[in-house]
Image (cartoon, grey):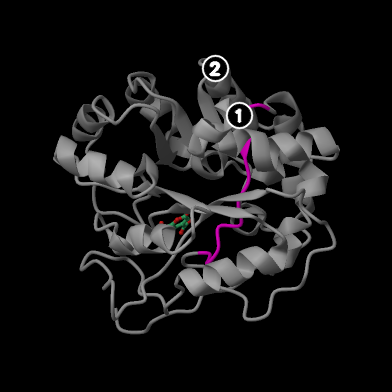
Amino acid sequence: MTDRITSWHGSPSRPLYTPPPGAIDAHCHVFGPMADFPFSAKAKYLPQDAGPDMLFALRDHLGFARNVIVQASCHGTDNAATLDAIAKSNGKARGVAVVDPAISDADLAALHEGGIRGIRFNFLKRLVDDAPKDKFLEVARRLPAGWHVVIYFEADILEELRPFMDAIPVPLVIDHMGRPDVTQGPDGPDMKAFRAFLDSRDDIWFKATCPDRLDPTGDPWNSFADAVAPLVADYQDRVLWGTDWPHPNMQDAIPDDGHLVDMIPRIAPTADLQRKLLIDNPMRLYWPEEMRA
Ligand SMILES: O=C(O)c1cc(C(=O)O)oc(=O)c1
């Protein structure tokens, strides 16, 4: 692995849709900068630098107020780049870490201090070498108060992961809806299985994200809009939205981030739904102290 890849659009359009004041991009990442925060020796891709300055410029360009930064797999379990971006955000970012399951309670507390509010378990074989469920469960049982677990998996292993996920004692947030085949439509087998999973617990959240990854029909991603809008309407109090910038690994169909934002009114057509998706829901998970005020 020698070539560093660029996976993001160089000049994204300004969206036609204007997010409400206070809107949160609740799924994005930072890469490096590598000189300060080297990538993991186990990284499955080696990206160009996409640091906090670029992320915050995009946030402003797209009309967002805050970010939730999810530790990208290329940084392994060293969360320094994510913590650095949060520290530079003036309180406008919080994050999700990836940890060695043997992490000490003191180190978890330090992550909380740094703005982390959850940990991510990644089950994609193309991104990580192993995903030890027993160790994941052990650390999930001793997270700081108020944290949640983010899980990234593909639709074909949803059933296999059920016993593991059922045993996690904190809220779950499912990345990219567990990658359903959106071309099956809103009532296809993947969406049906995902709905059954959501119905099994009322503290399972999901991200209505990544039309660019999930919809092979391409921009403007009509299959994604058709399949996902009913899901957002039916589970409107536990859905999040994010850009996924800088779109790890995307090479063939790098999305225009302005067009991604223009998906929002197609999956959340009313102002009420948009407020829940972009403000109320992510605030409850990441800035709950402001909700209680
Ligand atoms: O599908 C992916 O390639 C991908 C990768 C990562 C990561 O490398 O962390 O994060 C994502 O949300 C999606």
Q: To which residue does mark 2 refer?
A: 202
Name the kind of residue labelled 2 in the image: Asp
Instruction: Please name whichever residue, 11 or 18, is drawn nearer the observer in this view of the structure.
Output: 18
Q: To which residue does mark 1 refer?
A: 238
Secondary structure of the residue carrying numbered label 1: loop
- The earlier-in-sequence mark between 2 and 1 is 2
Dot 1, how many residues are within 10 Å of its Cα: few (below 14), some (14-19), or many (20+)? many
Name the kind of residue labelled 1 in the image: Arg
Q: Residue 179's spot in the image, x, y percent?
A: 54, 44
140 w.r.t. 203: above or below: below
Determine the CA span between mark 2 and mark 1. 9 Å
Q: Residue 207's spot in the image, x, y percent?
A: 58, 41
Instruction: Please name whichever residue, 155 or 246, is drawn nearer the observer in this view of the structure.
Output: 246
Q: Which residues are magenta?
A: 237-247
Question: Residue 153 occupies which quadrant of the picture?
Answer: top left
Question: Residue 217 occupies which quadrant of the picture?
Answer: bottom right
Instruction: Please name whichever residue, 159 or 11, is drawn nearer the observer in this view of the structure.
Output: 11
Secondary structure of the residue carrying numbered label 2: loop
> What residue occupies the far bottom of the structure in this picture?
3
Ligand 1, what quadrant? bottom left
Pointer 2 with pointer 1, Cβ within 8 A: yes
User: Which residue lies at the image location 85% right of the left edge and 62% below the top edge?
Assistant: 16
